[in-house]
Amino acid sequence: MKPDMTVNIAGIALRNPVMTASGTFGYGAEFAQYVDLEKIGAFVTKGLSLQPRAGNPTPRIVETPGGMLNAIGLQNVGIDAFIEKKVPFLRTVNTPAIANFFGNTVDEYVEMARRLDGIPEIAALEVNISCPNVKQGGIVFGTDAQCAFGVVAACREATIKPLIVKLSPNVTDIVSMARACADAGADALSLINTLTGMAIDLNSRKPVLANITGGFSGPAIKPVALRMVWQVARVVKIPIIGIGGIMTATDALEFILAGATAIQVGTASFINPSAAQEIAEGMEAWLVNNGVASVNSLIGALEV
Amino acid sequence: MQFKSMILANAEVSPGYWRMRMTAPPEFAAAQPGQFVMVRVNSAIDPLLRRPFGIFDVGTYVPAHSGAQPQPYLEMLYRVVGKGTAMLSELHETDLLDILGPLGKGFDLGPLEEEKLIVGGGVGLAPLYLLAKELVRQSRVRLFAGGRTRDDILCITEFERLGVECYVATEDGSLGERGLVTEALEKRLDLDAGNASIFACGPHGMLNAVAAIAARRALSCQVSLEGYMACGMGACLGCVTPGHHHSPETPDYRCVCTDGPVFDSVDLKWGA
């Protein structure tokens, strides 16, 4: 019998728990020739800001054992070009599109949430709080519980669409961040964003990335991500979307066991553009082989 | 497209430089000179990312068994520079590779009547062979191949066989003229600055010099760039290069993978 792969995230029914992670899947169209977008649960578009952003100088990426560092600098087309040039494609795909966004100030976040709220093709918003607050000395919103609460509560007021908050792992206590965002009205949490890292070229005695530091992603970060998902899932009631180094269906199912309702495939899409679809198919095959009738019965089913 | 390819041959053609022939889907017959492929060196996670390689050649071969039909192949010319390329060099006939391609925007062949000047530095020759093959059908083609030593001068006889007139320059003088390939190019242009266009691939310093030569003489010039990239399809935004009008105030980044890898040299920002 075909297992039930559908899950519900903040009121959006997904045909399966597999989503793509922001910044690894373009605006969707880039991958259409490699992935049947209607075989995955949802896709998240590249992080958007009010104004277009050029991003950082190069080198922007470097490979590390089992992972990569990126310092793209949130390059994106900006909300106006997104609406004009990218949204028409979303209309052609029968899969929820989730818009990831960020701002430099609470006001910018609110304005973005308000603008995205008005786009019918967008099923939900994912807010990236791993950005510095330029009005508060550059403190990263997502590394201070009060700051995180403030920006999420403000976005909550600005949209009636489901609001997913993407958490930064670069904190002392991920649970307090998760609680603050849940208390501020988030409908779901996605975690983890990249871990801050760096790479050095011994011969030149210089950092490899022009930005010096970058976000560490890929299979090497999976254990950290699994641990954080597990910790958060034990204390918050809203659904969790697990992210971090997922390369295979096995990885994905481990996150579900740890307490995630859905997962996002990120870096894997760079290496294998059809990874998200293959992971969704692999998860279903695992359920069949193991006589599990519904993926929902695995959520948080870790035996400790 | 994404496909599994079987290695047909993998041989060192000069110390540190390898040439690999592998099976390709029929679509590769239409690959444009200058396009590239993203190759997954193995299925493990180290190295994690694919490696980009220019398409050196495409063609058909007849498999060894009787009654076999001609099958398409693809060739790459690569230099062993790190872990990924070292692993690639250790692969053998019948080993399988996961490949994405053909990717990117290739060379515009331009008007037939002009002379075509191809400039390659070291392994930068890789995407220029297929280009020469196309160009020689209609136009006079000269190749300027440069490198540090004779070991860095690759596949010259292949170009000669196409009917391309080859000029070689090495920095140590071990083959051809002693000096930079750009000096050889300038010498030729001094002799005959007629109607010519330039196609170049190689180290950034060489491309910078070629672009400057083309600008001074108002010649059309296309360059093929390399970039650190994770995906090859415009998603990671790792491989960007500054466009002509780029400045910190008016940023203008182009993706090497999807806007290029071939650019008109006047569209890019060059160093002083």
Image (cartoon, grey):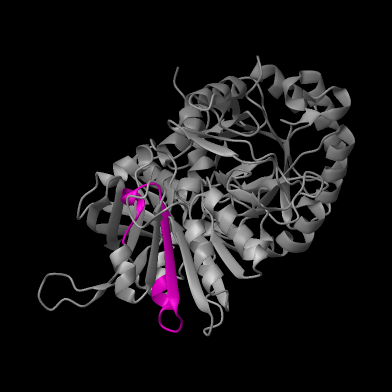
Q: Is residue B96 above or below residue A131?
A: below
Q: Is residue B79 left or right of residue B219?
A: left
Q: Quadrant of residue B74?
A: bottom left
Q: Is residue B116 above or below residue A195?
A: below
Q: Nearer the viewer, residue B152 or B57?
A: B152
Q: On the rendered image, what quadrant is the N terminus of chain B found in?
A: bottom left
The image shows residue B124 at horizontal and vertical percentages of 44, 55
Which residue is at a point 59% across and 39% down the rendered structure image?
Answer: A59
Residue A34 can be seen, yes or no: no
Q: Nearer the viewer, residue B18 or B84?
A: B18
Circle count = 0
Q: Going by the picture, which residue comes out furthest to the left?
A: B66
Q: Nearer the viewer, residue B208 or A103?
A: B208
Which residue is at a point 80% across and 52% down the rendered structure image?
Answer: A79
Which residue is at a point 60% across and 24% down the rendered structure image?
Answer: A233
The image shows residue A92 at horizontal and vertical percentages of 65, 66
The verdict on residue B154 being magenta is: yes
Q: Going by the picture, which residue comes out furthest to the top?
A: A172
Residue A214 can be seen, yes or no: yes
The image shows residue A153 at horizontal and vertical percentages of 84, 30
The image shows residue A225 at horizontal and vertical percentages of 54, 27
Q: Is residue A236 above or below residue A19?
A: above
Q: Is residue A102 above or below residue B9?
A: above
The verdict on residue B210 being magenta is: no
Q: Which residues are magenta?
A: B132-155
